[in-house]
Image: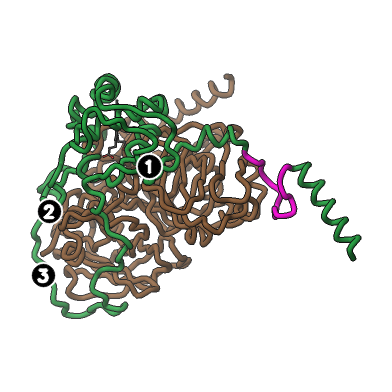
Chain colours: A brown, B green
Amino acid sequence: MKKNNKNELSKLKNRNRRELLIGASSVGAVSLAPKNLLSQEANPENLPPNLPEWTQYLGDGVDVNPYGIPSEFEGHVIRRNVEWLTASAESSVNFTPLQDLEGIVTPNGLCFERHHGGVSVINPQDFRLMINGLVDREMIFTLDDLKRFPQTNKFYFLECAANGGMEWRGAQLNGCQYTFGMVHNVQYTGVKLSDILLETGLKDKAKWVLAEGSDSSGMTRSIPIEKILDDCIIAWAMNGEALRPEQGYPARLVVPGWEGNMWVKWIRRLEFGDKPYMTREETSKYTDLLASGKARMFTWVMDAKSVITSPCPEKPILSKGLHQLRGLAWSGRGKIKRVDVSIDGGKNWKTAQLHSPVLSKSLTRFTLPFEWNGEELKLQSRAIDETNYVQPTIDELQKIRGVNSIYHNNSIATWLISKNGKVDNVRLG
Amino acid sequence: MLGLAKYIVSFSLIIFFINSSVASDRKFNLGQIATKEEITGWDIDVRPDGLGAPIGSGTALIGEEIYTEQCAACHGDFGEGADRWPALVGGEGSLASHDPEKTTGSYWPYASTIYDYIYRAMPYGVAQSLSYDETYEIVAYLLYMNDIIEEDFVLSNTNIGQIEMPNRDGFLLPDPRPDIINTQGNPCMKNCQVSTKIIGRARDIDVTPEDDNS
């Protein structure tokens, strides 16, 4: 109680100082609209030869935030949702602010959320993983049991199959975050399912696994046994700390390179069987309706994709001269081999620089320096993965799949840079 | 030799009785053997062939009552969907149209999935609160509303695997991707023949949320 009071006091003190300096509107978790970034200006009193406040006076001591939080000036770096998309916030989605991130690691608090029945709150003592069906021994594991198995640590991207789903018919949402933000990339710590299966044994007839969540949607997906034995993980940590509640705390399934819906959060059960289970999520949802009225089923892999994260609609160009174009590329089939960038809508391409580490089934960072002298540009990026798969145009996808697929839109987007430096999501044709 | 083999056999028998499993098969000796009772409580899935369907039955006649009470507020009196909540009935013949309507009747390939999903996840926010019979009754009601069974048809664990759904053959397997023109990692780099005319702008559609608290 006493400690809290002290914290409050020092917060108050700081706040008063800051309000004097920069005005009340910048204090706290106020989110800045992209347009306001344009008008953000420095305070001349803090610039040379003047002495800023922070140079003269003491700042906060340790433990003001026992769990550190981002700078108050980064308040605009948040997940955002599109309210009109869904009927209820418990079955909804928000988006990772890719435009504000660097490197390949997504900070835990910025990983997009997708729930079908809200966020379950689970005491790790109450966690149980049940394994039943076509195994030699039907078993139950506690979280502590799982942590005693040999450990694995791997970076993987997780992308919702519906990422970019609103863009099938045209350019709809004017933002990198809303059109590409259903992806995140973290380092998972966990146990390989193939190791857990050494404990339960596996019957020859076992060909499919039903993965089931313990949340109020009872999320369920069928996964072929080859994938389970290949690289699937039960993870309890992300980026070095326990999973966030909204990412499945205390444990989730990791299905590298495959659509996010299969990465069952709050996992409670794996049932082994000889046939797929045909759950609601793999029939009613996550099937890709073609123009013929027939739908593709079990389209698990996330094909190669890339996005320019700056400039983008949220990151206009503010000055002429040299800029570093930044972007992310990824493929569910392996490593990214190359990323090309066009500034003229796809007529001419230049190969961008990939930054290490370039990992399999992980986001990969690319950059390309470019000069801007106030002309109109049409920016595009195109990923090529190690299988030589080339990221397609929306035209190429539409010709084969129509416009009603919702899922698996991995096409090239176009950011139009206007003469005033503003950036728009546009469709070319 | 023979003596040693006998010794090993009786030794593993002892372990067998202690752990009630063959410990020597287990690599790490972690976890517990699940009891029948534990599994029965959690193993709620129902497969297309009816495997896993719990014993029970129901007709649309009774289902209508429960549906009206527990489901209609969101899904509409006739399954047409209230506000933005999902529709459960209708959409027949719409799948190849500009605005396909995917419902349990027009799209779902298996009746088992309707049972499995409703029992595990509905009513929204009060999961696994329906009895087995109530679930069969509601599924029967939805099938009846979608003109798939008659009003007095008794749906049960013995026939849920045999209901013929209209869109049973509507799904394509296996995944044909990669399905685009294969440029084998060597796409055009210079003077490529593409149209660069702007035919649409997200700004004009104007559905992008704006940050309003700045």
Residue B115 position by quadrant? top left
Q: Where is residue A195 in the image (x, y as percent from the top left)?
A: 61, 56
Taking the spot 35% from the left edge, 73% from the top edge, the residue there is A338
Q: Position of residue A280 (x, y in %)?
A: 34, 43
Q: Which x, y percent locates residue B12?
A: 80, 51
Q: How many tags in the picture? A: 3
Regarding residue A76, the answer to whether it shows in the image is no
Q: What element carries label 3?
A: loop
Q: Are marks 2 and 3 on the same chain?
A: yes
Region of the chain picked out in magenta, as a range: B20-34
Label 2: chain? B
Dot 2 or dot 3: first in sequence order is: 3
Residue displayed at 23% across by 51% down: A406
Residue A46: percent from left, percent from top: 37, 44
Q: Which of B102 and B141 is in front in this view?
A: B141
Q: In this view, does A127 lie to the left or right of A428?
A: right
Q: Which mark is residue B195?
A: 3
The label shown at residue A113 is 1
- Secondary structure of the residue carrying numbered label 2: strand
The residue that disc 2 covers is B201
In the image, is residue A426 above or below residue A147?
Answer: below
